[in-house]
Image (spheres, rainbow, N blue to C red):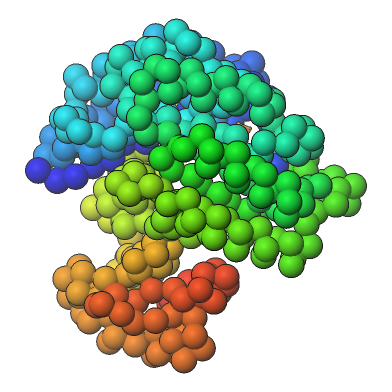
């Protein structure tokens, strides 16, 4: 049996956050209600099943968007469709993303009953003014209520999402956010820096806000690592921290280039080095036939390097040779030596990994592994 992960994209949100460029929209805007969307999703899950007879599902992830916005019973229906059509491992990790404002006791009960065993809650900040400035629909108090509901329902694996470099955020206010988050003892914390994406309202209004300086941004980044490490969270990926045994299995599949099938609007898949993305507009998705793109050998190698380097343990030299039939040094020896010479990469225990300095400018380091296809 081969391994497979499933991603379900739920593109609905109550209201768009000001920094968000994910594929999501308020329910009324796309002319496709949530009930109809759930049916389309289940149809896609069913129609695809024949391709995955040889696979066992090790993780499932409901993302978005705000999957907790789906009406009562929809998630249970989707899970039932998956179990009827796929071989889901008994200990599969099954995650649901939640916006605290949408937490409802009855729905959380439904999630745990249908086998969801990991909740990922978007907090971002414990400072209400910061939340308001980025257009989040919840405050800190609402988050605490949601967290309690989730814990009281019996969830034993919870992630909290945090954000640094927010407008008006100071190193001290970010420290408060981190400290309050760890006091709740979630098993996992994701801490990303805000990226101002062109076209978002926050980007358009950027001149009106005071963003943290580069030094403050850096101080927040270092504080994240230090404070979380002192509370027992180890960093296993550039922006992800976990208590022992709670690394996110699903996200590791992306970084390690495992097989994943994405269902729903705009969802991406990669199975056996063939990649495809579902249509991002509802009309085309309704009629959907996937356009599949087999990755070239160079694309596979590039992905192996720049996804693998996101992980703190780095890329495994032997696995590279097994997968591509060529030693890593034959393909990338020059780049690796150069980056090691600059103190941005290191070779250790049969792996190549980013150093502390390399993590700071990881995008630059990873770009070195792209092939120049014009040569
Ligand atoms: S809740 Fe998440 S997906 Fe929805 S608008 Fe906000 S950031 Fe985007």
Instruction: Please count the marks in the image.
Output: 0
Quadrant where the C terminus sits is bottom left
Q: In this view, does 179 lie above or below 151?
A: below
Q: Where is residue 311 in the image (x, y as percent from the top left)?
A: 39, 62
Q: Which residue is drawn at 73% across and 51% down?
A: 172
Q: Where is residue 299 in the image (x, y as percent from the top left)?
A: 37, 66
In this view, the residue in front, 83 or 213, is 213
In this view, the residue in front, 122 or 372, is 122
Q: Residue at x 47, y 50 (%)?
A: 231
Q: Residue at x 38, y 47 (%)?
A: 243
Quarter of the image where one finds residue 290: top left
Residue at the right extreme? 208
Report the image quarter containing ligand 1. Answer: top right
Quarter of the image where one finds residue 187: top left
Quadrant where the N terminus sits is top left
In this view, the residue in front, 302 or 365, is 365
Can residue 294 be seen here? no
Q: Position of residue 194 (x, y in %)?
A: 66, 50
Q: Is residue 367 above or below residue 294?
A: below
Q: Position of residue 369 (x, y in %)?
A: 43, 76
Q: Residue at x 58, y 51 (%)?
A: 192
Can residue 309 be seen here? yes
Q: In this view, does 3 lie above or below 16?
A: below
In this view, the residue in front, 317 or 192, is 192
Q: Image check: 282 left or right of 268?
A: right
């Amino acid at each position: 049996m081969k391994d497979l992960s499933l991603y379900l994209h739920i593109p609905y949100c109550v209201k768009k956050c000001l920094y968000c460029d994910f594929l999501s929209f308020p329910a009324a805007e796309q002319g496709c209600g949530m009930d109809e969307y759930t049916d389309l999703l289940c149809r896609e899950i069913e129609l695809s099943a024949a391709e995955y007879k040889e696979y066992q599902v090790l993780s499932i992830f409901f993302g978005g968007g705000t999957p907790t916005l789906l009406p009562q019973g929809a998630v249970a229906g989707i899970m039932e469709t998956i179990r009827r059509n796929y071989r889901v491992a008994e200990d599969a990790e099954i995650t649901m993303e939640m916006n605290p404002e949408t937490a409802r006791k009855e729905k959380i009960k439904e999630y745990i009953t249908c086998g969801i065993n990991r909740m990922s809650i978007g907090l971002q900040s414990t400072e209400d003014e910061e939340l308001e400035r980025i257009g989040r629909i919840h405050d800190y108090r609402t988050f605490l209520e949601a967290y309690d509901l989730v814990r009281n329902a019996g969830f034993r694996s919870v992630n909290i999402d945090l954000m640094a470099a927010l407008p008006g955020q100071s190193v001290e206010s970010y420290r408060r956010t981190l400290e309050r988050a760890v006091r709740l003892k979630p098993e996992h914390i994701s801490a990303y820096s805000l990226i101002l994406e062109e076209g978002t309202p926050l980007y358009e209004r950027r001149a009106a806000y005071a963003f943290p300086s580069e030094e403050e941004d850096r101080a927040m980044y270092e504080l994240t690592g230090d404070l979380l490490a002192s509370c027992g969270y180890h960093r296993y990926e550039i922006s992800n921290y976990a208590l022992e045994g709670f690394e996110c299995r699903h996200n590791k599949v992306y970084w390690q280039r495992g097989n994943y099938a994405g269902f729903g609007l705009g969802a991406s898949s990669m199975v056996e080095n063939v990649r495809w993305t579902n249509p991002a507009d509802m009309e085309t998705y309704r009629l959907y036939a996937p356009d599949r793109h087999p990755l070239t050998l160079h694309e596979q190698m590039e992905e192996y390097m720049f996804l693998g380097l996101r992980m703190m343990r780095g890329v495994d030299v032997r696995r590279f040779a097994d997968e591509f039939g060529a030693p890593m040094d034959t393909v990338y020896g020059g780049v690796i030596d150069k980056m090691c010479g600059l103190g941005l990469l290191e070779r250790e225990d049969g792996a190549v990994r980013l150093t502390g300095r390399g993590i700071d400018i990881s995008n630059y380091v990873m770009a070195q592994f792209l092939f120049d296809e014009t040569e």
